[in-house]
Amino acid sequence: MNGCNFVNFVKCIENIEQAIETVNNHYIDILITEMLLNDESPINLIAQAKKSCPEIEIVIYTSHDKNIYSIPQLKAGTIGFLSKNIEACVLAEALSKIHNHKLYITNNFNNQLNLEIDLERPRNSFGKLSTREIEVLKYLTDGKRNIEIAQQLKINQKTVNTYKK
């Protein structure tokens, strides 16, 4: 591939509100985002962006473990989950394929996936954990307390306890 001529950078954002404002005010094919924006849930961003612009494609570009987080993000509506460890040419190839074909799976991830993937069936090392349970688990491993998790996810503290169980 000879460059990434189709890419037009719109804006660098820091939180969900800025992301949704940008989606509402600009035509965007692909939203590339870190998994957490100022420690906010990526599930909230995905849901709000898809609600504002159903045809938008969302790619998570992160250093978080794909084995834990990729399937929940795909279930939530993203089209890709790319590691920050990939080379720039791989990123350019992925964006080109997503832009042109609406699909991109890296070779190393492809080797681990059945292409007839059923996103309703758990395939990560955490088995039957839901997307929200994995979010709560991530915050717990970051040392967050229940009240902090509840505030971040905009849910009740008792609900956090339920997800922990």
Image (cartoon, rainbow, N blue to C red):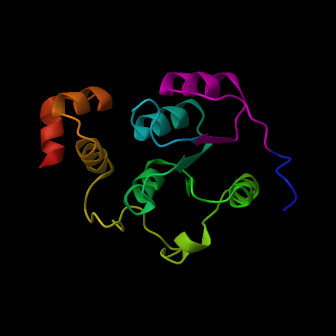
Residue 71 percent across, percent down from the top left:
42, 59
Residue 114, above or below 58: below
Residue 17, above or below 99: above
Whether residue 98 appears in magenta in the rendering, the answer is no
**Taking the image as drawn, is residue 137 in sight?**
yes
Q: The N terminus appears in which quarter of the rendering?
A: bottom right
Drawn side of residue 118 relative to residue 94, left or right: left
Residue 127, above or below 99: below
Q: Residue at x 70, y 35 (%)?
A: 28
Residue 13 percent across, percent down from the top left:
58, 28
Q: Quadrant of residue 19?
A: top right
Drawn side of residue 1 relative to residue 25, left or right: right
Q: Residue at x 18, y 28 (%)?
A: 147
Q: Residue at x 42, y 35 (%)?
A: 44
**Taking the image as drawn, is residue 55 in sight?**
no
Magenta stretch?
A: 7-32
Drawn side of residue 71 relative to residue 20, left or right: left
Q: Quadrant of residue 56?
A: top right
Q: Quadrant of residue 148?
A: top left
Of residue 148 and residue 52, the one placed in the foreground of this image is: 148
Residue 81 percent across, percent down from the top left:
53, 55
Q: Residue at x 13, y 43 (%)?
A: 162
Whether residue 10 appears in magenta in the rendering, the answer is yes
Of residue 145 and residue 29, the one placed in the foreground of this image is: 145
